[in-house]
Amino acid sequence: MTSTNTRIAVLVGSLRADSVNRKIAEILRDEAPEGVTLDIVDGLDQVPFYNEDIDGENAPAAAAALRERVATADRVLAVTPEYNGTMPAVLNNAIDWLSRPYGAGAVVGKPFGVIGATPTPYGGKWAHGDTARSAGIAGAFVVEDVTVSQSAVDVDPTTDPEVRAKLLSALNTLVEAAPAVSAA
């Protein structure tokens, strides 16, 4: 495990108070290795849909706060379900805001992982793939080995020891990932 303090901004793709994915984020926050802090970024529902007309120096306060929290993090972890075969709109919108300004957004060069659970046989793999692709296009360094797409059909991902072990392993992999180095 890394010897320095590592701060991970966590973007939860579900707004539901009793969300399994929020519970997963909270479990990882509470069980994070020593020296690792998970900061669950609340308020994604307060960030307006991205619109270049309202961006810039006077960007909405919720968007500016999102950017600041992610910019000051060492890594980013999306914990998300799957809605209609893709990522939830709230997560997509957050990535849109974090991708601007182009080439210098808050996620540029940061190790980025995607995990989560959904009550389908596929466990959210399409949403996780779409999230990873979008974050990569936004400039994040997507850590491929940090993907846990867990079906919540036959198992409770918050209590099953094998699932929890996979989630903690994914977290450790994200912590150990080296940030991307800019070629500039």
Image: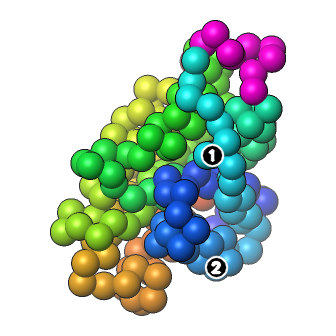
- The image shows residue 73 at horizontal and vertical percentages of 72, 46
- Can residue 137 be seen by looking at this rendering? yes
Give me the residue at 41% from left, 33% from top: 134
Horizontal side of residue 32 vs 69, given as left or right: left
Q: CA distance from mark 2 to mark 1?
A: 24 Å
- The image shows residue 144 at horizontal and vertical percentages of 38, 49
Q: Against 152, is 110 above or below?
A: above
Classify mark 1: residues with Cα within 10 Å, few (<14), some (14-19) or many (20+).
many
In the image, which residues are magenta?
Answer: 52-60
Q: Are marks 2 and 1 in contact (CB under 8 Å)?
A: no
Residue at disc 1, secondary structure: helix
Q: Against 162, is 171 above or below?
A: above
Q: For the residue marked with disc 1, what is the amino acid?
A: Leu
54 within the magenta span: yes
24 within the magenta span: no
Q: Quadrant of the C terminus?
A: top right
Q: For the residue marked with disc 2, what is the amino acid?
A: Glu
Give me the residue at 47% from left, 72% from top: 20
Horizontal side of residue 46 vs 11, given as left or right: right
Residue at the disc numbered 1:
44
Q: Residue furthest top?
A: 53
Residue at the disc numbered 2:
31
Residue at disc 2, secondary structure: helix
- Can residue 177 be seen by looking at this rendering? no
